[in-house]
Amino acid sequence: MENLNRGLLFYQTGKKLPFIKRAEGIYMWDHTGKEYIDACSGAVICNIGYGNPRIAKAIAEQSGDTFFAYRIHFENEPAVRLAMELVEHSAPHLNRVFYVSGGSEAVESAMKLCRQYFYNTGQGSRSVFISRTPSYHGSTLGALALTSYAPLEIPFRPMMQTYPKIPAPYCYRCAYHKEYPHCNLECARALEKTILEQGPENVAAFVAEPVGGASTGAVVPPEDYFAVIQETCRKYGILLILDEVMTAFGRTGKLFAYEHWNVEADIVALSKGMASGYYPLGAIMARDSIVDKVINGGGFAHGYTYAGNPMACAVGREVFRVIREEHLPENAAGMGRVLKAGLEDLEKRYGIIGQVRGKGLLLALEMVKDRDTREPFPAEKNVNMLLTNEAYDEGLILYPRRSINGLSGDHVLVAPPLILKKDQAAQILDRLDRAFKRTMKKL
Ligand SMILES: Cc1ncc(COP(=O)(O)O)c(C=O)c1O
C-alpha cells in the first residue's frame, strides 16, 4: 500500500478505511488479513454473495464477444435475453424493460416515463409525485426530491422540486400516535387526502419502497396497506411506482417484494441485487399500455450511454439465473426467520434494542434510550455509528442510519447475502452480541 495518495479520492467523507483484498461468499478480507462478515451485503446489493465463479465465467465468455456496443447502433443478445427472463418471472402485466446503470437512474427513469405517458395522453397537468417520509429513492435531484432523509436534502433544497410526502407505515413511531389495527390505516389514507389537496388532475404517481430500506430501517407495512394504496391510485388515475431497488431479486423472501401483497405496480424500479455488485446495472419494468403511448408518441425522451450494456446484461442474466436456480428467495425467507429469531434473542438481552423488524433478509434493529417510551438516544451520541464501529472492529459489517428522518433515532440494517447458511447466521449473531457488549460499555 506504499506510494498510494489516498487524499486524492473522496466520497461522502474523507474517512480512511482498510483496503479490501479479497471477498468470497459472505466473507471479506482487508489488506492486513483481517476477516469480516458482510452482514449488509455492501449497500444491500450483493444478494448472491462475493466471488461466484459462475459470474466470472459469464464475464469471460462475454468479453470474448464485446464489452460494449452502443444501443443506437446495435441490439445485443444479452440485453434481449435478460429482458425476456425478467418479463417471464415478474408479474404478467410488467412486460417491458428499460435498462439503466443504478438505482437513482432507475427511479429518475420511472418518473420520466410516467410523466411522458401523461404528457402524451392529454394529461399534461399531471406532474406531481407523492412519496413518503422517511424514505430513500436515490441521490440525483429527481430521486432526491422523492427522498425524505433531511441531512441528504437540506443543502440542495433550493435546487429541488418540493413534492408532497405522506407518512411511511412506520408503526413503531406512528405519525398519528395510533396503533394498528385500530388506526384505520391513516398513513395509507393520507394518500387520498394529499391527492385531493394537490388536485387529482395534477398528480402523476405515488412512489414507495414496498419494504422500507435505509431511511426507515426495514419497515414492513401492515398487511392491508397496499390494498388501500392500490385502490386510491386507481380511483384517481395516478400511477403506482414501486421502488424495488433494494427489495427485488429475493431480498425479502420473494423474487419481488410486491408478491407479498399481490400489489400491481404500473412501474417498478430495479437495481442492486439485479447484478449483485458484479457490474453496474438497473432497470425499470412497466406495462405495455404505458410504454406504447410513449414510444408511439415520438419515443422516450430519456436515456443513458451505458443503458443495455452487453457486459452488464450478461452479468445480470447470470446473476438472475443463480438467484432462481439456487432458490435464493426461499433461502432468504428461511434464513431470515432464523436470523430474526436470533436478533429477537439479543433484544431480550440488551435493553437498548427497541424493535427488531423486517422481512426475509432485509432486517433491522432500532435502538432506543428508553424501551417503554421509545425515546431515542440524544442525536449526538450517534448510537447507530457507535454500534457499527464496534461491530466493524469485531469483523462484522452493518448498515447504520438515523430513524427519525435522518435527524435522530438509531437503527442498523442486518441484510447479509441471500446465500447465508445457518452456522453463518450464528456467527453474525455472535459477533453482534460482542459488538453490543462493547457498545453498552461506552454508553
Ligand atoms: C430504495 C432505493 N432506491 C434507490 C436507491 C439509489 O440507488 P443507487 O445508489 O444505486 O443510485 C437506493 C439505494 O440505496 C435504494 O435503497
Image (spheres, rainbow, N blue to C red):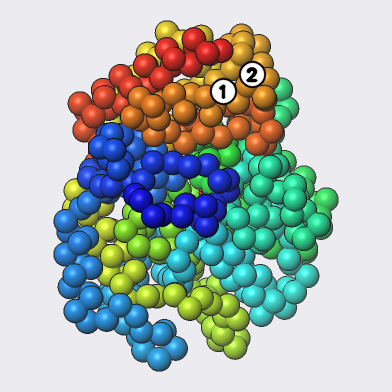
In the rendered view, would you say 279 is above or below 148? below
Compared to 167, does 69 lie above or below?
below
**Amino acid of disc 1:** Val
Q: Is residue 414 visible?
A: no
Which residue is tagged 2?
377
Mark 2 and mark 1 lie on one chain; the one further toward the N terminus is 2
Q: Residues within 10 Å of mark 1 (few under 14, many from 20)?
A: many
Tell me where residue 113 appears, x and y as whole percent: 59, 71
Q: Residue at x 66, y 16 (%)?
A: 375
Question: Quick one: which residue is furthest to the front in this view?
Answer: 3
Q: Please determine whether, in this image, residue 260 is positioned above or below residue 158.
A: above
258 on left or right of 296: left
Percent from the top left, x then y, of residue 174?
66, 27
Is residue 364 or residue 131 the one in the foreground? 364
Q: Residue, x 67% and y 28% (percent of image)? A: 408
Report the Cα–Cα distance between label 2 and label 1. Answer: 7 Å
Instruction: Report the side of 414 relative to 354 (left or right).
Output: left
Question: Of the numbered discs in the image, which one, if any, rests on residue 92?
Answer: none
Query: What secondary structure is marked by label 2?
Result: loop
Disc ID at residue 383: 1
Residue 166: x percent and y percent? 71, 42
Q: What element does badge 1 sit on?
A: helix
* Quadrant of the snapshot with the C terminus: top right
Q: CB of residue at label 1: within 8 Å of ligand 1?
A: no
Q: Are discs 2 and 1 less than 8 Å apart at CB?
A: yes
* Quarter of image, res 13: top right
